[in-house]
Amino acid sequence: MIRAIISFLASVLTAVQVVLLHTGAKGLCFNEGCEIVDSMTNVSPLVFNIAGFLFFQALFWLFLCGRKGSEYWHKLARLLLLAGFAAEAVLVFFQYSIATVFCSYCLVILAVIALLNLCCGMYQFVRGMVIFIAVLVACFSLQFGPSSAARGSSLDSGSLAMVNGKRDGAKRYLFFSASCAHCEKVIESIGADNICTVRFNPIEKIEKLAVPGMVKFTDYQPEVNRSLLQSLSIGEVPVLMVKTEDETHIFKGEKRIREYLEKTCKRNRDVDYSGTSNVKTPAYTFLSEAKKSGEDACLVNTDCDTNVAPISTGQ
């Protein structure tokens, strides 16, 4: 009976999540990871939770019917739980390797599935863990997404929009987050007097973006942008990458980026790198000022605590 009760309570939890998402309210979550993970899936979070509700409802009725003595219903429930373990392994891999942040609500669902397997006996739990680990190993042995996210052509696929300017042989990519107020200020600074070509590469799906002279792209891959920042061990936005034929400069933080745009991308201005500190790597030169984290940038996986309205995102 305990298995039926757990399944029923889990279905109630997913039903509440469905109602919240359907009404446009913020779903149940204990961190910012849920919004980030939701923004990177092709399937709507509403569909995911409806599937979860049906999954736990099916388990509830199977366990309930199994109380009458028919082992057939229990076998079917155990098989469904093993499938749930396999699906959760894929989601755990996605959160760890692709989204680089864990969704607390998703982990609660994983814990419920693990508990139900355990309630079916240690043999069932061990079989589930074997499947869970096997799927994880298979996922980690594969490479997902572009293999060369740091190349200009790959970064183009991560661009939501661009503004055209002079052809000076440089490619500029602005990496930003919808919840980052510092990113908003940088974007607002790119006004009508801008003469540079700048591509806008968000780290999640963005619904609205308004920049004078902007050309939007209907198909873009924000995971490309997150992958690049992760490969460079950059955990904050905004970030501006300026690629030329010979070198690549990376500007981190609102102040440094706005200084670059003011000196380089306004009419009758010239770039001046004097007074900056350069930290060179084989392919990149980082140009940023030493400042406390959060004063001039936002962490990739958290919202900024400022009074500036964030960019709208699609959920």
Image (tube, rainbow, N blue to C red):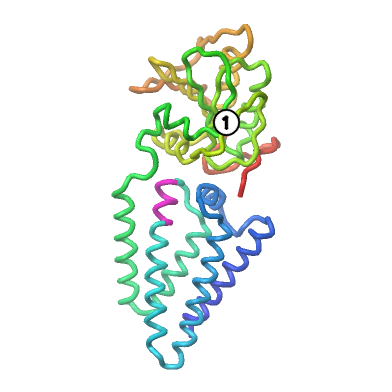
Q: Does 237 lie within the magenta span?
A: no
Identify the residue shown where x is 60% and y is 42%: 303
Identify the residue shown where x is 55% and y is 23%: 198
In the rendered view, tell whether residue 258 sits above or below residue 84: above
Relative to residue 213, is residue 277 drawn left or right?
A: left
Which residue is situated farthest in the bottom direction here?
A: 69
* Highlighted magenta segment, given as a residue range: 91-98
Which residue is situated farthest in the front direction here?
A: 218
In the rendered view, tell whether residue 180 sits above or below residue 35: above
User: Which class describes the residues within 10 Å of circle 1: few (<14), some (14-19), or many (20+)?
Assistant: many
- Whether residue 256 appears in this view of the structure is yes
Location of residue 66 in the rendering, given as x and y in whole percent from the top left corner = 44, 87
| Residue under pointer 1 | 161
Q: Does 96 lie within the magenta span?
A: yes
In depth, the one of 253 and 267 nearer the eye is 267
Identify the residue shown where x is 42% and y is 32%: 154
Give the dominant element type of the magenta stretch: helix, strand or loop: helix
Mark 1 element type: strand
Location of residue 21 in the rendering, given as x and y in whole percent from the top left corner = 63, 58
In the rendered view, tell whether residue 91 sits above or below residue 176: below
Question: For residue 218, which quarter of the picture?
Answer: top right
Question: For residue 89, which quarter of the picture?
Answer: bottom left
